[in-house]
Image: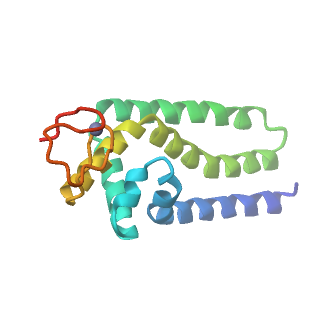
Amino acid sequence: MSDALSYSLLLVAAITVMILMATSRYFLPVFVSPIFHELLSFGTPAARRKSLWRARRELYKLGRYRFTMAVTALVWSLIVLPVFAFAPTPSFMVVGVSVALVLCPIASTWTNILLFRDELRTSLRKQLREAGVPICIACGYDLTGSVSEVCSECGTRIR
Ligand SMILES: [Zn+2]
């Protein structure tokens, strides 16, 4: 591959990452709603974006989240490093860096969403309750019309 071509690829990768970062709050709720059904109970796409954003921000307060983020970054760097060490030609290295530039943020975002899905889910359920949607924080059961002290699905105290 020619140098010009590989550097163009790097430029495309950098632009792609910037676009992904700028727009992730719009498309991420769509991608994660199969995992977090709670999102669908928020009435509007704007409310879904806001609640997912807040749930992710709340994770930063957890010490073990920051620790896991650091470990994830380290692991992904270790996967990418061989590209620098063993690249046969400089243009091969540029291509490797371009691919890593796009894949690493996507991979770490998904790793963290999946590792902390329980915490994210709990935050979304709490936000739904704040918004007036009666839902069990423990199991997500819809408590509309329930007058009981405990969730009829899982038995968790709700009042
Ligand atoms: Zn329940």
**Residue 9 lies in what quarter of the image?**
bottom right
**Residue 3 lies in what quarter of the image?**
bottom right
Comparing 77 with 30, the one in front is 30
Identify which residue is drawn at 31% across, 50% down.
Answer: 124
Name the spot of residue 65 as percent of width and height, x first: 36, 34
Identify which residue is drawn at 48% across, 39% down.
Answer: 114
Name the spot of residue 87 as percent of width and height, x first: 79, 38
Comparing 101 with 63, the one in front is 63
Q: In the figure, is residue 147 to the left or right of 6?
A: left
Comparing 15 with 141, the one in front is 141
Name the spot of residue 53 as percent of width and height, x first: 35, 56
Picture layout, residue 157 above or below residue 29: above
Identify which residue is drawn at 26% across, 42% down.
Answer: 137
Q: In the figure, is residue 30 to the left or right of 97?
A: left
Q: Quadrant of the C terminus?
A: top left
Name the spot of residue 145 as percent of width and height, x first: 20, 54
What coloring was used for the rendering?
rainbow
Comparing 70 with 148, the one in front is 148
Picture layout, residue 115 above or below residue 33: above
Image quadrant of ligand 1 equals top left
Identify which residue is drawn at 13% across, 39% down.
Answer: 149
